[in-house]
Image (cartoon, grey):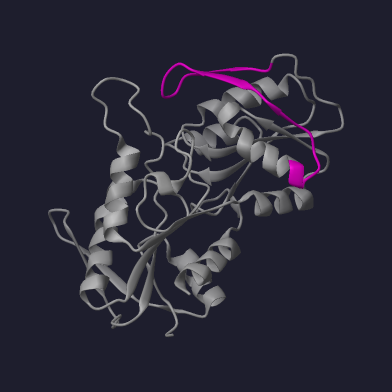
Amino acid sequence: MSPPLFISMPGNEALAARLVVRSGGFLVPLDVHTFPDGEVRPRLMQDVAGHSIALVCTLDRPNEKFLPLVFTAAAARELGARKVGLVAPYLGYMRQDKRFHPGEALTSRTFAALISGAFDWLVTVDPHLHRTPSLAEIYSIPALALHAGPVLSEWVKANVPRPFFIGPDEESRQWVADVAKQCSAPFAILHKERRGDRTIGIAAGDLSLPDDVTPVLLDDIVSSGGTVIETIHLIKGLSRHAPIVLAIHGVFAKGAEQAIRDTGAALVTSNTIPGRAAAVEVDRLIASAIADIMR
């Protein structure tokens, strides 16, 4: 079997290069030309006929990334690629998994159908599965959801003395409980009331923190930052130690990352989305999954 070929969509070059090193594959140069009217034209700069292809594109800000991505996938298939898969460390459009108000689109299902129609397989990391039991529920292609818990716990063990994990809401329990168990550390789950896209209320109940622990606020996604900032203020009233914010995906709406840092909390994420906070590598998890799915 020929070695896998990787194609990096713009902005994903560093991760693609590391995956090539880990997998023993090769990187196919890609030129994405943008016309004056904003349309794009991807061009594969190497023959891909007969090869299995992995396109690397983390899908934060998916609106601007999606068309170049599917155009590239279609070109690879038309030019003779044997299989075309997608490595999307962060998978967007997972939040709208039900109609909260009449007339709303079920964007998670529609996006899944579009991805399933363009690719033969999908590898992602901790998608925001809340009311959807698994990716197989909405994706019709093989879709692997990897878990960052082991690498998060490794980072905590190496960097945080006596962690006490705190989840901002019940949705975070699955990640908080898993990492806390791997670190043999205590945890607590708070109660969140969402009053809008950027307005959050957090309640701690009767939570108290021992004096010698380091609070670690853990969630899967940090986007607007409202939940995190509200929880940081609450934790500061319970602990003399500045909290550490640990997230799998640092999506960060405009101004959110700096607003979190301005609270005095440390901020660490995995590298599913490149950025200043991305200190926890998920590369080996992804490389191993790619090797399995391409066998």
Q: Is residue 244 above or below residue 47?
A: above
Q: Position of residue 148 (x, y in %)?
A: 60, 51
| Residue sitting nearer the eye, 23 or 276 | 23
| Residue 88 picture location, percent across and down | 43, 56
The answer to if 15 sits in the magenta stretch is no
Q: Residue at x 49, y 34 (%)?
A: 130
Of 37 and 228, which appears nearest the observer?
228
Image quadrant assignment for residue 8: bottom left
- At 47% from the left edge and 67% from the top edge, which residue is drawn? 293
In the rendered structure, the answer to whether residue 216 lies left or right of residue 37 reads: right
| Residue at 22% over, 70% down | 75
* Range drawn in magenta: 181-204
Quarter occupied by residue 244: top right
Task: Say if 6 sits above or below 152 in the image.
Answer: below
* Residue at left offset 34%, top offset 53%: 140
194 w.r.t. 64: above or below = above
Q: Pinpoint residue 272: horizontal percent, then vertical percent.
A: 51, 53
Q: Could you tell me residue 65's position as x and y percent?
A: 31, 53
Q: Is residue 245 visible?
A: no
Furthest residue in direction left, as rendered: 37
Q: Is residue 217 at all visible to an observer of this figure?
A: yes
Residue 187 vertical position relative to residue 101 in the rendered view, above or below: below
Closer-to-camera residue (142/26): 142
